[in-house]
Amino acid sequence: MSSHMSARPQRIEVITGGERRRRWSMEEKQAIVEASLAPHASIKAIARKHGIGTGQLYNWRHRFLGAGPTKTAGFARVDIVNDPPRLSGPIASAPTTTPTGLIEIVLPGGATVRVDAQVDAQALRRVLGVLRG
């Protein structure tokens, strides 16, 4: 035997006729994705077993695992006003200086938050987090 003959045989796949694209049902795709999520599962071996590419399997995994609701980027309505509306009622103490950089944030639920340039960023994050719910 020559060294060429003692080498491990290669896998050869013969395709006869005009093979069309394979159609996978959602159940089949889910079963393959679930198999790929098993501990110590080899993506390459699972893809080879089912006759698909690893890229296809990763696409299916992304589709099934990332199928939750996603937030899309959008625009927020901003109104620029010359003179902010004044609150009615008693004032605890009169401000010593005029606030600069006044920002008014109107949230979708109707809550309004007004802050100036001196606001503590961490406190504002906590307040907005609670109001967004």
Image (spheres, helix red, strand yellow):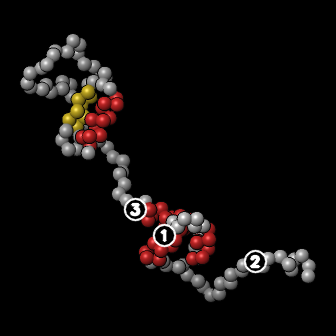
Q: Around disc 3, counting alpha carbons within 10 Å, would you say few (fewer than 14), some (14 to 19), or many (20 or more)?
A: few
Residue 76 x/y as whole percent: 29, 41
User: Is residue 8 or residue 109 the one in the foreground?
Assistant: 8
Instruction: Find out whether the residues at labels 2 and 3 contact each other: C-beta distance under 8 Å.
Output: no
Residue 7 x/y as whole percent: 83, 76
Question: Which type of secondary structure does the marked residue at label 3 adopt?
Answer: loop
Q: Residue at x 33, y 46 (%)?
A: 74
Q: Is residue 55 left or right of residue 132?
A: right
Query: On screen, 51 above or below 37?
Result: below
| Quarter of the picture holding the C terminus | top left
Reading the image, the residue beneath label 2 is 10
Reading the image, the residue beneath label 3 is 67
Query: On screen, 80 above or below 56?
Result: above
Residue 125 x/y as whole percent: 32, 35
Q: Residue at x 57, y 76 (%)?
A: 50
- Disc number placed over residue 34 in the picture, else none: 1
Residue 124 makes an appearance in the image: yes
Question: Which type of secondary structure does the marked residue at label 2 adopt?
Answer: loop
**Quadrant in the picture for residue 91:** top left
Q: Residue at x 61, y 74 (%)?
A: 48
